[in-house]
Amino acid sequence: MRKKMYQDVVANHFREHSSTYLFVIVLFLMGVIFGAIVVNSLSFSQKEDLFYYLSQFFGQVSEENIAGARDLFKQSFLHNIKFISLMWILGISIIGLPVILVLLFMKGMVVGFTVGFLVNQMGWDGFMLSFVSVLPQNLIIIPIFIIATTLSVSFSLKMISRQFMKRVGQPMMPLFGRYMATFAVSILFICAAAGIEAFISPILMKSVIHSLQS
């Protein structure tokens, strides 16, 4: 019975915010595409410099000369928590709406640039490296960021409609409570993503690098 109730709540949420989700997903994909296009606009010397540093990093991964798993976990967790926290703060500040969208676009751009650069420089080998280094943790992080962006945008729009359009809707406190609760739950998923990035991705990267070198 409780499971059915939760399923109804989730279904209602996605139905209510379907247009916002569609807009946010398209914006993120535009960021990914733009990031991949930027790779082609780099000069030959810029690509050479980036690829040199990238090769140095992969060499360190192969020789296990990178930061420990705990340090990687801490760095990844803090980075993503700062990102989510900024979105949460911007969502409750009326003027933060455009900044939220810019942040998501930039996130998509980073992913697109990373994958695009690896594929551009290394072809199929680069695709395999991006598959094990970028994809695993982002299977969790990207949906969380998309949900966080949608909630932040929706909450900001509700505040704008109440403050400037004088529309009377649902009381803000219950909405604010659900808003905070959702972001608290997102911390658990970010923790899981950081664990994958710190403990699983380096192992996958090392195995792929060794297979490419052999």
Image: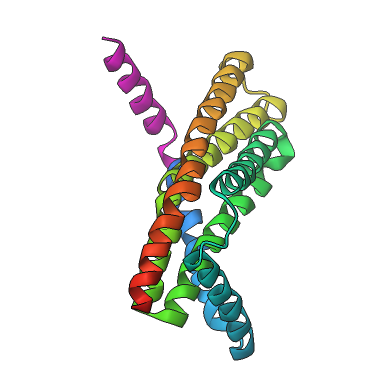
Magenta stretch holds residue 32: no
Q: Nearer the viewer, residue 15 or 207?
A: 207
* Residue lying at 60% horizontally and 29% vertically, measured from the top left: 158
* Residue lying at 31% horizontally and 11% vertically, measured from the top left: 2
* Residue lying at 59% horizontally and 41% vertically, measured from the top left: 77
Residue 112 % position (x, y): 49, 65
Q: Outermost residue toward the top?
A: 1
Magenta stretch holds residue 4: yes
Residue 199: in sight, yes or no? yes
* Residue lying at 63% horizontally and 82% vertically, measured from the top left: 49
Span colored in magenta: 1-20
Q: Is residue 117 left or right of residue 49?
A: left
Q: Is residue 99 left or right of residue 48?
A: right
Dominant SS in magenta: helix
Residue 68 % position (x, y): 57, 50
Q: Outermost residue toward the bottom?
A: 44
Residue 114 % position (x, y): 51, 67
Based on the displayed image, in which of its 4 quarters is residue 8 positioned?
top left
Q: Quadrant of the C terminus?
A: bottom left
- 197 over 29 or under it: above or below: above
- 166 over 114 or under it: above or below: above
Q: Nearer the viewer, residue 186 or 157?
A: 186
Q: Nearer the viewer, residue 64 or 98?
A: 64
Q: Quadrant of the N terminus?
A: top left
Q: Nearer the viewer, residue 116 or 201?
A: 201
Residue 146: in sight, yes or no? no
Based on the displayed image, in which of its 4 quarters is residue 162 positioned?
top right
Based on the displayed image, in which of its 4 quarters is residue 163 positioned?
top right
